[in-house]
Image (cartoon, rainbow, N blue to C red):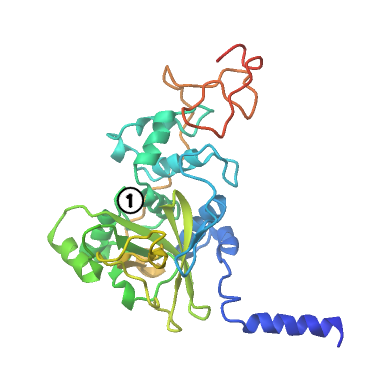
Amino acid sequence: MSSRWWLLLLLQACLLVPGTASAADPCPLLRAQTGAVDVATRVAAIACDEHQLWYRPFIDADGRVGGSSVREAEVSQLANGEQAWRRVAGYWRGSGLLAAVAHRSGAAECEYAGMGDAALPACRTFLIDTPWSAAFVSWVVRQAGVPGFNVSASHVSYVRDAYRQPEANAYRVVAPEAARPARGDLLCYARSADRTFGFAGLAQLLAASDEGLGMHCDIVVDAQPHRGLAWLVGGNVFDGVTMRMLPLTPGGQFRDLPVRQPADLPCSPDHPAHCNANRQDWTVLLQLRPGEALAALVPPPPPTPAAPARALPAGFPVQPAGTPAGCCVYCVAGDTRVPRCPRAAAGGAD
């Protein structure tokens, strides 16, 4: 038999193996559509583009984590050459939420994260200590120009908006187990350590109370029932922008969505079967409304432009002129990735 026929048979066999084609990441193609006319596609494309910058860390459909190589407060460069910590500070600035957390130590310093080569250790401490997943969602939605969405540093705030003001909101609230996710949707879970809410419990809290609730939401970037998978992207997941894969039924609903229970054994070497990063208290899917409904909503403010150059406040640890590339004179304590410049090249600095 000729080599051509062997190749054809091999290709056919690969297509028939379950799961072989189902794991294809949609983001490499989607990321080119950030200027799409369709709002849902823009949301997905912007989230995908960020995921690509972070070198594509992921949680597979079995809850296993892989590919995480850069952390939120590191000076390591992302795929576009930007330092990771500066990118995260950009989510806060670009979403317009930095003022909302100005009371937190180090937040004000992050205003300068996009300028020069200042080390800004207080800003980097803020990025470690302050959850930024809601800022990431808000940044993506704002960049996509989605109307009827109030950005917030707290997921529960915009979930509550969608629940209480459905006609004025870009999203409508549905139970995740009964939903068919699509591009631009937000899938959310509650973080409470001592109880689970589910959709009914969350709805009760949203209806009766203004209290806070720790939550996390991922952005659905694609859902393909014929492949049996949905792909979601979230910020501050294992300290980066991470993709999550969740199984779908042939009808397009989530299949066997793993649900956390308070009595679950902790993830440990003694109980590896409980180490599933997809096992969460999934509480709500926010479904993005159709384009014609979105067009009737209040337009969003334009994306925040890059901050104009300003002089850094006195005392910021700016590297002196002539500092060789790839090393530091004024180094951040605990940062071992950037070596201290040799004494001769640094003009005698210690």
At which x and y percent is residue 289?
36, 68
Is 88 left, or right, of 206 in this rendering?
Answer: right
At which x and y percent is residue 301?
37, 48
At which x and y percent is residue 164?
20, 62
The quarter of the picture where the C terminus appears is: top right
Give the camera-side residue of 253 and 334. Answer: 334
Give the camera-side residue of 102 and 249. Answer: 249
**Which amino acid type is marked by label 1?**
Val
Q: Residue furthest top?
A: 348
Q: Residues within 10 Å of mark 1 (few under 14, many from 20)?
A: many
Give the camera-side residue of 221 and 266. Answer: 266
Q: Which residue is mark 1?
A: 151
Q: What residue is drawn where x is 34% and y is 42%? A: 130
Residue 35 sits above or below residue 312 on the image: below
Q: What residue is drawn where x is 53% and y is 46%? A: 70
The quarter of the picture where the N terminus appears is: bottom right
Is 226 left, or right, of 152 in this rendering?
Answer: right
Quadrant location of residue 88? top left
At which x and y percent is residue 173?
28, 68
